[in-house]
Image: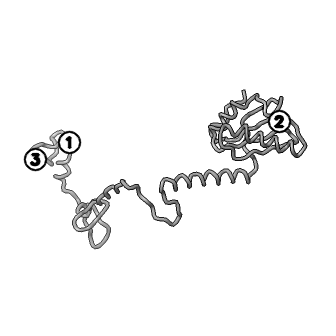
Amino acid sequence: MAGVGNFTRNSRTLYVGGLKSVSARDAVKEQEDALWKQFGEWGEVENINVIHRKSICFVRFRHRTSAEFAKEAMANQALQSDEVLNVRWAFDDPNPVAKQAGERADRDAVVAMMQAKGVTTGEDAAFDYPEQYQMPPTKRQRVEGDTVASYPDTDTQFSAEGGSAAAPAAASEEDLYAQLSYADPNGQVSTEQPEGDADNQE
């Protein structure tokens, strides 16, 4: 078992170990051609980096699905003669230049995909709405009289005296009693005190 790779990143590079150690120029060229031919059967190969002193190489595909097929198909197989290939998922390149190149390639791929769909990607271009898009109607603001206000007009609830700050209007004693829950439903409010209360005060 060589693992399933990383699900959080789009890994497209395979580590291939167990290559035959070669040093002659012609043998090196034949080995690289064999790598391009054998792994190219499973999808478009972007790059093959062969490290001859370690007898390993890194094969980067254009699509992850191609790398998955190649990993399963080429594991424990022979490349040229009797070698047994050890194929695993490669770790991410720690080189910051390589990381920036990968991010730039991803951005370019997104831009190319959007341009293929007819979307304007220029920074100074106007925003293009879809053809069937309809703007929603704007909400009307609350209108109080002749002026547009976001809050209701509460000037009638306060009285201004001498140009000073508004002060609450003093309500009459009858109005205050009428607002009580146990007030007389007929609207007749008595301000006289009960007899018991009068006796207690005496």
Residue bearing the label numbered 2: 19
Question: What residue type is disc 1 on?
Answer: Ser
Locate residue 166 relative to residue 193 in the image: left or right: right
Rendered view: 49 above or below 170:
above
Distance from label 3 to label 2 (Cα)?
Answer: 108 Å
The picture places residue 3, in percent across and down from the top left corner, at: 70, 30
Rendered view: 2 above or below 55:
above
Foreground: disc 1 or disc 2? 2
Question: What residue type is disc 2 on?
Answer: Leu
Rendered view: 92 above or below 175:
above
Question: What residue type is disc 3 on?
Answer: Gln
User: Which image quarter: residue 60?
Assistant: top right
User: Which image quarter: residue 50?
Assistant: top right
The picture places residue 35, in percent across and down from the top left corner, at: 76, 40
Distance from label 1 to label 2 (Cα)?
Answer: 95 Å
Marks 1 and 2 close (CB-CB < 8 Å): no
Residue bearing the label numbered 1: 181
Which mark is first along the chain, 2 or 3? Answer: 2
